[in-house]
Every structure is written in C-alpha cells, then in structure tokens.
Image: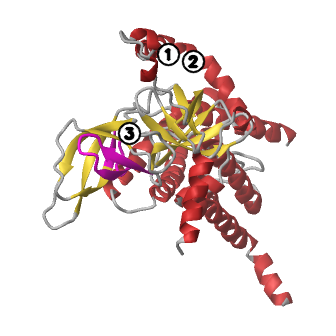
Amino acid sequence: MRNLFALLWKNQFFVLFILLEVASILLLSRSYSYHGSLAYNTTSDITGTIFTSYSNLTDYLSLTDENQVLADENAMLRNTLNSSYLITDTQYVYRDSMYHYIPVKVVSNSVTRSNNFIMVNKGSRHGIEKEMGVISSMGVAGVVVGVSENFSTIMSMLHNNMRISARIKESGQLVNVIWGTTNYFYGAVIDIPSHIRLHKGDSIVTSSNSFIFPEGIMIGTIEEHQTSKNKNLSTAKVKYSTDFNSIKHLYIIENILRPEQDSLLNQTIIEHE
Amino acid sequence: MNNALVRNIIRFVALILVQVLVLNNMNLSGYLNPYIYVLFILLLPANINKSLLLILAFITGLTVDYFGNTLGLHTFSCVAIAYLRPETINLFFRNHEFASGEEPGPSSIGYGGFLRYATTLVFIHQLILFFMEAFTFNNFFFTFGKVILSTMLSILIMLIAVMIFGKRKKRF
C-alpha cells in the first residue's frame, strides 16, 4: 500500500492531470442531454450582473434598430385592439387567458457554438420557471433551462438538444424541428410523413403538444425539402423567422394551465397502466 | 516575486473579462470565435511547479466555462495544454536557460520562438475544444476548418496583446 502511494506521489503530475480531466468530463457529460442541461447549468446572479453592466454600456449602439422593431410590434398589437375592429361585438373578443407573456431583455447571447444559450434579465423573482417557452417578436426563440433569482438562461433553437413539436401550417401535419445544421439562419424539420410535399416558403408553426408554446407561433419557412423514396419520413431545411444574431427583446410564455394539463396527463397514464 | 504574482492576477482578470465580454460576442463571418484567455496559461513562468500549472489551468478553464454556460469544455482543453506545456517548452527551447520566474514570452524567447510555442499549444487547445463541443466527427472538415481559422485569429490577437502590453526587452 505504501508503495502504491509512493508511486502515485512520484507521478503526481500525471495523476493530477488525469484527476482534473476526469472532473472536467464529469462536468461536461451533463451538457450532452436536454435533461442534463436542465438540471445543471451556471445561471447565477454573479455572471448575470457582469453581463448586464456590460450590456448597459453597449446597448445604445443598437437603439435605432430596436426602436424600429418595437414600433413595428406596437403597430401590430394596436391592430388587434377592439377599437381597431369595425364591428365591436362583445362576443367577438378573444381573450387568451391561458398564456401570460413576460417581456425580457437579452443580456448575453451566442450563435456560433454547437450549443447556444441566451441569458435574459428576469428570473424566479418575476415568475419565470424552467421549461417555459420563449419567443421573439418574429417567432420562436427557445426554452428556459436555468433560473436564478434575477436572471434566466434560455436554450436557444441553436442547440443540439433542442427539439420542439411543430405543425406544417397548411396541412396541419405534426412534425419536429431540431437545429441539425451549423448555420444560425437554418434549422431542420424532421419526421415529415412521406406523402407530404413541401415547397419553398411554406410556414412551420408551433403545435401546442408540449404545453410549452401556444399553438400557431411562427418557427420559420421551408427553404428546401429533401425527399427520398425509400424512407417513410423525410426532412426539410427551414429558415428561422427569428434572427438569432440580432435579438434584444424576448417574451417568456407562462402557460397558466400547465400544472392542470400535466396532472391530468399523469393521472390518465396511471389509470391506464 | 510579489510583483510577478500581482502581474499574473491582473492578467488573469483582464484576459477573462475581455474573453467573456468582448470576444465571446464576436463572431467573424458567423463562426469564428477567438480565444485570448489561453495567453494566461502560456505566459505563466517557464519553471512554475507543474502541479500548480495544472491547477491554475483548471481554474482558468472553469471560470470561462462558468460565464459561457459550457461547464467542462474549456476546463478540459486548458488542463490538456497545461499538461503538454512543459514538454513543448523543452522541445522548442532546449538550449534556452530560463531564469526563475521568467515568462516564455516574446521578451525572452523572441517573436519567432513565441509564435511557434503559442501556435502549437493554441492549435491543440482549439482542436480539443471544437471537437468536444461538436461531439461528433460528422462535418469533420467544417469543424477542422473552424479549428484552423480560429487558431490563426487567436494567435493574431495574442500577438497584438503582447506587443501592446508586453515587457520591453532591455538591450545594451
């Protein structure tokens, strides 16, 4: 036993190297799955505060573009006001009481890695929880995976573990969207039934299957559809409607009825087993 | 001695801040992300205790990972080049006698020597980093291209940094 320790001590450099690398791999291994990322990430007020102060310094550089985006969105919202309709029948009012939108500001973002995250300036104090959906004014942006008191981290659509349930707007067929490429403009639509032919410009929208996003939020438009004869399911390239490189303001979606939906689903599964 | 300690602490903080606040947000032509913080590991004194070197590299990597939400990725790459650093210095500067606390920077080994030494280690760092990140050999040439270009860019930025902030070599 003493010899063993002597040997280890003699090779302490190599032993320490192996120990530190094993520790790194243990940390790293958690990031290779969606649930790992969900359970384990470094969202904290320390990193958040540093990113915010830096973002406060540089934000004014993009004020013009931001104003334009906000003005466009205001115009769009005004169009949906009751007073914008000619017929103000009280029965016609559409109240979306199922979802609650929390506006947030991006404090840090990346698009060039294999797995990209966005950090925003609100957290658990503002009612944000893990697995809430995130959209920009242009379309889907990602899912919340980490929350601290004042900040949260979003797994953006540009992440290898990202997979969201979607619909082809025209036919209503269910498909899935993953990133699948290395370019931040494009994602991949997978699991398309073989009889469906998609054309350039067809819209892909969210389905409400995951209880995370409301139905019908824009994800992107088809760029090209690769069909193969011998496969049942084909894939297509989709151009994201969100420009991930320029996002500054996002909305986090709280599904108010989610606990009810989840418990009903669990109950049903238990009863039928 | 104390002077060297203070200098290294300031270098550590400055390089990490530049890395996470400026360079991590930089994406030239959409893919390239230079990594300047590796310079901290490169410029630690040439005859530093090897185990201390490993531990410092581990802390450096962990800090960058903490800010980038990539736990383990930079840590792994940093520890790997810290392990290879003594051998690399031996290989390139066998004939150079380093004084205690002397840094293997341009002021002691010249720009040519520093370039060879830095390029070797930065290339290995980026190679490990990008392939661990992609976690696949699909798109091999795409990832490899990223490694090459990113190495060149990182080296360029490091050279500019050591030219501006490096110690002037006293010549008589």
Question: How packed is label 3: few (under 14 Cα within 10 Å), some, or many (20 or more)?
Answer: many
- The residue carrying mark 3 is A184
Q: Is residue B116 placed above or below A48 in the rendered structure? A: below
Mark 1 / mark 3, whichever is N-terminal: 1
Residue A183 coordinates in the image, percent (x, y) = 35, 42
Magenta span = A163-188
In magenta segment, residue A168: yes
Q: Mark 3 — on which chain does it sit? A: A
Residue A50 located left or right of residue A102: right
Residue A96 located left or right of residue A130: left
Q: Is residue A38 placed above or below A84 in the rendered structure? A: below
In magenta segment, residue B37: no
SS for callout 1: helix
* Amino acid type, residue under disc 1 in the picture: Ser
Q: Which mark is residue A59?
A: 2
Nearest to the observer: residue A183 or residue A4: A183
- The residue carrying mark 1 is A62
Residue A215 coordinates in the image, percent (x, y) = 41, 40
SS for callout 3: loop
Nearest to the observer: residue B30 or residue B144: B30
